[in-house]
Amino acid sequence: MEQRLIKEEIREQFYLYKNKFDITENITLSFKGIGNSAIYTWFDRIIIQNITVNQWIKYPQRTKFVIIHELVHAKFKELQNPFYVLLGLAPAAVSLKYAMRELRANTIAHEQLGCNVEVLEDYFTNFYNVNSNTKRNLAMGYVNGVTNIKLIKDNPIWNKQAIEDAVNFFTSEFPSLRKISRQKIDQIKSTFIQQL
């Protein structure tokens, strides 16, 4: 299948999920870069990179997962502070907030794809490119595929229980997040619950 047709099909999926999430902002989709990821950027734009586009032929669920994930970020206007991204450092409370954003986007993508465990495991085992829970990755909200699979299998629907369990997991499993005050943890938890 030629690239133009692949991109048309991906664009159809993009608008299908954009409408499903009732996103009224004018979010644009573009295809740029050679990597295997995507990003929600300033100016309401989602960029999907070439390797992700090419997954469409054999593994369309991987590409759909990425589309849904980025649209969830767009729905909640979740941009990362470029300073933290460049340095790979963020205050513990920001890291927790970013980890919750990433988990929400991943869990909702899993939900939208029918809570299919095979799709979940394939995405995080064969495509997702974060392999370790380093301090730098966590600062940007990224945890490895094994951690994502565990958390999403434990709570396959993004709801209050998923939020509470995720906050408890992150703040007990990651030493850098243990120093966040109980008040700040409760505030972060409450914010995510209010956004349900």
Image: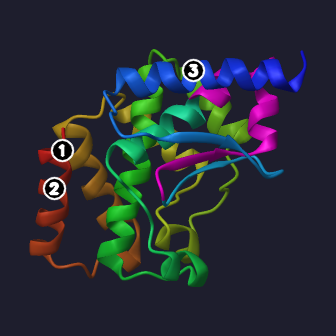
| Dot label at residue 13 | 3
Residue picked out by circle 2: 191
Lower position in the chain sequence, tag 2 or tag 3 = 3
State whether the magenta stretch is mostly helix, strand or loop: helix
What amino acid type should be assigned to the residue bearing mark 2?
Thr
Cα separation, mark 2 vs mark 1, equals 6 Å
Q: Which residue is labeled 1 in the image?
A: 195
- Where disc 2 sits, the SS reads helix
Q: Which residues are magenta?
A: 43-64
Where is 70 relative to 175, above or below?
A: above
Q: Amino acid at mark 3?
A: Gln
Q: Closer to the observer: label 1 or label 3?
A: 3
Dot 3, how many residues are within 10 Å of its Cα: few (below 14), some (14-19), or many (20+)?
some
Number of numbered discs on residues: 3
* Residue 158: quadrant of the picture: top left
| Quadrant in which the C terminus is drawn | top left
Identified by mark 1, the residue type is Gln
Q: Is residue 144 left or right of residue 114?
A: right
Judge whether residue 90 can be spotted in this image.
Answer: yes
Q: Position of residue 142 (x, y in %)?
A: 52, 59
Q: Is residue 46 magenta?
A: yes
Tell me if 34 is positioned left or right of 106 in this view.
right
Q: CA distance from mark 2 to mark 3?
A: 29 Å
* In the rendered image, the vertical position of residue 41 relative to residue 124, given as above or below: below
| C-beta proximity under 8 Å, tags 2 and 1 | yes
At a point 31% along the width and 48% down the height, the residue shown is 76
Judged by depth in the image, the label closer to the viewer, 2 or 3, is 3
| Residue at (26% x, 40% y) in the render | 162
Q: Tell me if residue 118 can be seen.
A: no
Instruction: Decide: few, some or many residues near mark 2? Use Cα within 10 Å; few <14, some 14-19, many ≥20.
Output: few
